[in-house]
Amino acid sequence: MSYRPYQQIARRKSRQIRVGKVPVGGGAPIPVQTMTNTPTEDVRATVEQIRRCELAGADIVRVSVPTPESTAALAEIVREVNVPIVADIHFHYRRAIEAAKAGAACLRINPGNIGSKERVKEVVKAARDHGCSIRIGVNAGSLERHLLEKYGEPNPEALVESALWHAAHLQEEDFHEFKISVKASDVFLAVAAYQQLAEACDHPLHIGITEAGGRRTGTVKSAIGLGNLLWAGIGDTLRVSLSAEPEEEVHVGWEILKSLGLRHRGVKIISCPSCARQGFDVIRTVAVLEERLAHIETPITLSIIGCVVNGPGEALMTDIGLTGGGAGRHMVYAAGKTDHTIDEAAMVDHLVDLVERKAAQIRAEEEAARAAEAAPRAAE
């Protein structure tokens, strides 16, 4: 009941590639990516950060490998984590070859920036031999000189021309396991470039607003830019770029996808901004619940409304609901119906318990359904 969006977004048709075990494009669920900010040579710190990102819901993590020491460390990092690792390469083609051998699932490069056609062939061969895909990463801040001379400044046409120019390098080698990004820090520029690129090719697109800013400003810019693209059906994987810890990028990416009904994970809390009518401290209650329910991956909706004006209506559309009442007692809803009241002192613990039990019930039902579906196949 809670997860049928009012409007289903029609996604752009694209080819599908794989980043390790994760499918990208071709209608697959949109993976959420982030990037480490630890020194890659510090294996322990990098692995610990990637594991935190995994817990936050990261599907893919990018790691910078600018030196031979970092590609040497990459092999150990790949063995210690569960998510596919993208090796971030700029001008050093040997780092791409080393990263492929070290177990990277994808190489982030610009083929035209790594030297001669012979070097591109070597990188493609390494990618092919080791099962790597490639991401062509075009950025408005580092466009090729010939395009800046042609267009005078970064614009959508320049970004798209750069992307297709780089793609041609790979296609000449009969290599098609690649995705493309055309990022800019300006929302309008990035969105326009992605719109043009989406019309010009069927390659899967990695979307993002690069260098978006700090936690608040970057979240707003990313939500506007990525939200516009995703609503139009454009985007096969995404990264929210924030001057914040990578886990926060993952959380924001998931919230954008959840808001558009494109993916579902964890507890979605619908809460009021609070006012003088509130029967309890809504802001503090929601903050505590967000922290205590962060470990739950099962999609569940929870409404927290301070009074009876909108509380019952919101509860109709959520799995579990709470509406502020009087005298320190508040109404709890289950599946949209009034169920029981709870004292304010026990309210948070009680809601956490209800959500955890609901998550366990949903998991059990899903496992039973999978077992029932598999039984006839086993009998055959």
Image (cartoon, grey):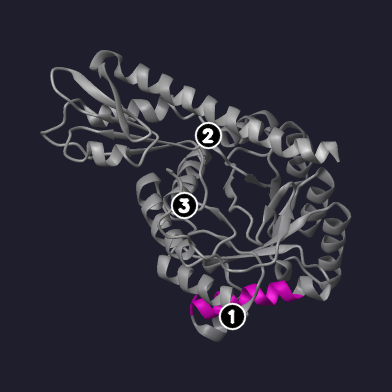
Residue 74 point in image, percent of width and height: 75, 40
In the rendered structure, the answer to whether residue 113 lies left or right of residue 233 reads: right
Mark 2: which amino acid? Thr
- The crowding category of the residue bearing disc 2, from other C-alpha atoms within 10 Å (few below 14, some 14 to 19, many at least 20), is some
* Residue matched to label 3: 261
Residue 104 point in image, percent of width and height: 76, 47
Residue 191 point in image, percent of width and height: 46, 69
Residue in view at x 43 percent, y 26 percent: 355
Measure the alpha-carbon separation of dots 1 and 2: 47 Å
Mark 3: which amino acid? Gly
In the rendered structure, the answer to whether residue 134 lies left or right of residue 229 reads: right
Residue in view at x 67 percent, y 63 percent: 179
Dot 1 or dot 3, earlier in sequence: 1
Badge 1 marks a residue whose secondary structure is: helix
Q: Is 344 situated above or below 48? A: above
Badge 2 marks a residue whose secondary structure is: loop
